[in-house]
Amino acid sequence: MRVYATSIAALTCVASSTTSAFTPSQLNGNAILSQRPTVRSTIPTSTAEPAAALASSRSDDPDPAVAQLYKRRPRPEYVPGQISDPDYVRIFDTTLRDGEQSPGATLTSMEKLEIARNLALLGVDIIEAGFPIASPDDFAGVKQIADVVGREVFDDGYVPVIAGLSRANQKDIGRAWDAVKGAVRPRIHTFIATSEIHMRSKLNKTPDEVVEIAVNAVTYAKGLGCDDIEFSPEDAGRSDPEFLYRILGEVIVAGATTLNIPDTTGWNMPWEFGELIKKLRENVPGAENVVFSTHCQNDLGLATANSLAGALNGARQLECTINGIGERAGNASLEEVVMSLALKGGTHFTGGPGSGKLYTAINPVYITPTSKMVAEYTGMKCQPHKAIVGANAFQHESGIHQDGMIKDKSTYEIMTPESIGLMRGESQSGAGIVLGKHSGRNAVGTRLRELGYDLNVDKLNAVFKRFKEVAEKKKGGLDDDDLESLVSDQAGSVNELWRVTGLQTTTGLSGIPTATVKMLGPDAVERYVSATGTGPVDAVYKAIDQIMGVQVILESYSMNSVNEGIEALASTRVVIVPSIGGPNDSAVMDAQTSQLREKKFSGSGSDTDIITSSARAYVSALNKLLTWKMRRMANGVEEASDTTGVAGGAVAVEGEAPSVVVI
């Protein structure tokens, strides 16, 4: 296993550091915040500034309209197993756990911390930070979030609950507790399957054995000192209701405070799932002493609908993810659930407990920035027509629609983009500036904020540097798609250990495709290698493999033209999987199957040259892999065997200025 000592030391050091517009009584069918004030959409992307301090500064803005956007919503005092206001719905975000299980959506610990801080700004009640037993890096990531985000108390007293997932056994539960107990409000979330097919085919257990395991798990968690315990009967949507009544009643007696009802395979129709929640509340002994929750998968595209059906029938915690990412077809989308309750919660949820005027304490102005951060870090872009956060969600091309929008924006928009943090600004209205090679940092930063990005100084500088490089080559300036592609291109810079400093390829109908690649390593020494391949990209990737000393499988490779024309920017995305048994083996435990699986890593790159774009994407993915491996070694998983940083036939070039040759 190759180890880069200087990078490990730096990484270890970093790891140890540390709307009232949607108040239910104000909701109606009209557009929200239709005055469209000019708003500074500023999300912290540096872990140096606590989210609580940033939120306080937003609500104190001298502009009343701006302050209103960022004003934090009141919420009932948090008590495990109880909610004093029966109309309040807790939002449980599992982006960092279930969301990260999406193939290729691997996040580094620092990326997880940044996302967790944005989730706190968003105001989610519970952050499920991960599956601590999966790997030492997962444990360290969860513990870091618990010790940092879980201890950042906002001015209004809010601090998110930090949850860790565990299977129903003592080893898992103990590991989860060790990871989250540093938070002000820690929670253990344990689960076991309850459907007949899962008990027979996966667990090979009888119903009696499953009940005993579940009770013992909750009892053990309670004995560790945890007073906030969530229990999930996996595949509840296909389980026998009578068996659910029994097992859920038993775990309540053992100490469970939240009962999460998963539609694990996305099988249920909304009316089926809503009826299940209703029956459980009516028939489970002790149901009045716990909070019922939903966790709906999207296999039939009904995750949001099922979650809302659960809320209609008394569920007061809804589990979801940013952008709806997750296993297979994904989870209920947080932005869809939250905005549905924001717009309809006060009028369409009668019949359950309380007055039927449901609400959350989510601050929607942070939805777009958080969505974009998750998309960039996971490499999983939203489909253009995705509700709330898709690129087309607030675009109008039809002439009839455009005419209506000009006359009254509420004719075709049930919410304003500003209300969810997408600041259209003047440039969207036709009075904008053209961004080209003469544009300054302020102009680029302003447009990025209007697009929903708010980068700290270092990240803005990195994007601006790439902007200048591309603008020199691209005539006519860069449009919004180009800018967003450059942000994605720089999203992996937080994990940058190696970078390409020189690249030259030769190819054609005759001859062997050859690439010479020069790279700057973590020891600040440049190395170069020449390699051949089946094509120019393959040759470049083989040269990079030799320099970085990795053995991986390229699982997917895609390239898109960001816009039209010969000078269009190329955007490349790759997903890699370390070779089994190789020096970068990355086996982790799957939370649902309990089987070891290879972790996948994605990377994105952009450039006007397709070969350079491909190289940048590949190196971005490899840097994520190496950063993850170093975290594991820093936690004592593997012994360092090579600290030279020199691979195979790589030749060090000291004192030579970096250069890029684009063919």
Image (spheres, rainbow, N blue to C red):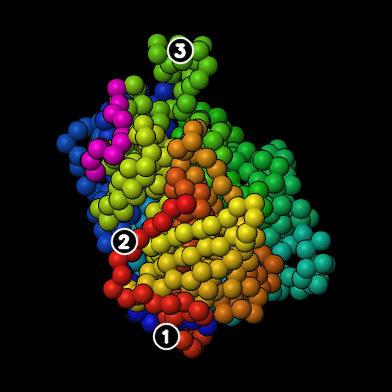
Q: Residue 258 sits in which quadrant? A: bottom right
Pinpoint residue 152: horizontal percent, then vertical percent: 31, 61
- Residue at mark 3 to residue at mark 2: CA–CA distance: 43 Å
Q: Which residue is located at x 74 percent, y 70 percent?
A: 210
SS class, disc 2 = loop
Q: Nearer the viewer, residue 292 or 462?
A: 462
* Dot 3 and dot 2 residues touching (CB under 8 Å): no
Inspect the image, locate mark 2, and give the three-letter code of the amino acid beneath it: Thr
Residue 398 seen in the current view? yes
Relative placement, left or right, of 181 versus 245 is left
Relative placement, left or right, of 254 versus 163 is right
Residue 317 seen in the current view? no
Residue identifier under label 1: 643
Residue identifier under label 3: 404
Q: Which residues are magenta?
A: 431-443
SS class, disc 3 = helix
Pinpoint residue 358: horizontal percent, then vertical percent: 49, 37
Pinpoint residue 151: horizontal percent, then vertical percent: 33, 65
The answer to if 386 sits in the magenta stretch is no
- Comparing marks 1 and 3, which lies closer to the viewer? 1
Residue 47 - label: 2
Inspect the image, locate mark 3, and give the three-letter code of the amino acid beneath it: Gly
Inspect the image, locate mark 1, and give the three-letter code of the amino acid beneath it: Thr
- Residue at mark 1 to residue at mark 3: CA–CA distance: 65 Å
| Vertical position of residue 330 compared to residue 648: above or below | above
Residue 153 - label: none
| Vertical position of residue 171 compared to residue 539: above or below | below
Relative placement, left or right, of 10 versus 80 is left
Which sits earlier in the primary sequence, circle 1 or circle 3?
3
